[in-house]
Amino acid sequence: MGSNTDSTATPLKVIIVGAGLGGLSCGIACRRQGFDVTIYDQVQEFTRIGDSIGFGSNTSRLLHRWGVGKILETIASTPVSMEIYNFNDSNTCLGKDKHIVEIEAKTGYRALVGHRGDFHLILRDFCIGLGVRVLNGSKVVDYDTSAPNVTLSTGETVTADIVICADGGKSEARKRVLGVDDVPLASGYAIYRGFMDADRIRDDPLAGKFKTSEDHIRLFLAPDMHGFINTMGGGEQINAVLTHKDTGDIDEAWTKEANKDEIMALLDGWDPAFRRVWELFPSCLDWKLVYRPCLDKWVADSGRVALIGDACHPFLPSSVQGASQAIEDGATIAKCLAKIGGNGANRDDIPIALHTFFALRHDYVAAAQRTGIEQRDSWHNMHDKDTQAFKDKFDINKASMTNIHLWENDAEKVVDDQWDAVSAQVRKTLAGQAAALATE
């Protein structure tokens, strides 16, 4: 089925709830197909929050195709490998995972690693430049999935052809759209995060060793823990991350101030330079990692409202794919809607498009989501818990990223290749469900 070219029809009107990385990317993808797009976000004003984030080549491929990749690339870090160290020795590099450059050579697209806030603002500005309306201070408080429409906190109701919910891990839409009143599960782990200008370590006798003029990713492996020291922005910024076991109460906030004494106690026995970096951070964040299995339903019964990204399949940071998979969701939805006639001539087929989006993505994303757990468990179980020595001779193949195959994916090509077969099956299934309801 190809796009309908009826020039008298009006473009599909798309509402996106949530202007995070996934929502903005979905807005870009939909606008490029010619849709009328409005994004609502409850935050009054976007600021440069967060620290490092990475997009694999699967995402940078899409971002370059859409025209924003080159802009992001100008501020992205350029590490050529992930150097791996034992937790108590920053002097001896055990090996280098070079997948980051190998995949670039294979796909033609490099990974994009940079400050989350910088990437976010670039995507916001690019969206607006394309003609997407990005409306801050606009909180969605209710949904009518049949219309479909959204109701804002002001009482205003806005109707569209499609509503895409990209409202993140604490999604209100999960309950209001799908009737899923889920409770987050404790993953048993938490992350400490720190970010600062590299000038703070320049002259330090211990941490100064990490001040370089190049970008580096350094992974430190420990029993039940792993940590990163990343130099970014041409070596001008330092980001550190520490994933550790945590049995505290679940708190989904990722802006909670960390207790520095607790961090240093946890790092007892670690390499002195690694410890010193954490001492020098002016402040750190304590992020409790919660987990939700990939939902079995992303599309409302009306077939006109769908969830994407963390709202339906949150990823653990160890997968290095959370933002990338949300962006792939947006790309897939836009392509599926274009297949039914993006100028709105085939509005009756919107449920076909959104259910096909789900059919194309669900199993793939569920498997990708599990790689975060598998990667963490691989890194955290290389040591004997009693002796804290490696159980076996260090093997770079066992320590390297295990889900690099995800980086080769082209979400838009998947739609082109599989649309006919998958949408035909979706159409048959929906017709059968309608017939069954008619006989009740």
Image: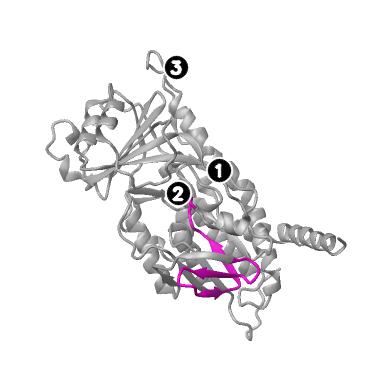
Say which residue appears at 37% left-offset and 59% top-offset. Answer: 120
Q: Position of residue 163 (x, y in %)?
A: 57, 66
The answer to whether residue 35 of the structure is visible from this angle is no
Q: To which residue does mark 2 refer?
A: 56
Q: Where, quadrant-wise, is the C terminus in this rendering?
A: bottom right
The region drawn magenta spans: 144-170
- How crowded is the residue under tag 2: few (<14 C-alpha within 10 Å), some, or many (20+)? many
Q: Which residue is mark 3?
A: 392
Packing grade of label 1 (10 A; few <14, some 14-19, many >=20) is many
* Residue located beneath label 1 in the image: 368
Nearer the observer, 209 or 116: 116
Residue 187: x percent and y percent?
48, 35
Callout 2: helix, strand or loop?
Answer: loop
- Name the amino acid type tagged 1: Ala
User: What SS does tag 1 mark?
Assistant: helix
Q: Label 3 amino acid?
A: Asp
Tell me the CA gap for discs 3 and 1.
28 Å
Q: How many marks?
A: 3
Q: Is residue 135 left or right of residue 372?
A: left
* Few, some or many residues within 10 Å of mark 3 (<14, 14–19, 20+): few
The percent coordinates of residue 342 (x first, y second) are 61, 73
Q: CA distance from mark 1 to mark 2?
A: 13 Å
**Circle 3 SS class:** loop
From the image, state whether disc 3 or disc 1 is nearer to you: 1
Q: Nearer the viewer, residue 45 or 65?
A: 45
Answer whether residue 155 is magenta in the image. Answer: yes
As measured in the structure, the alpha-carbon distance from the residue carrying label 2 to the one carrying label 3 is 30 Å
Residue 327, percent from left and from top: 50, 56
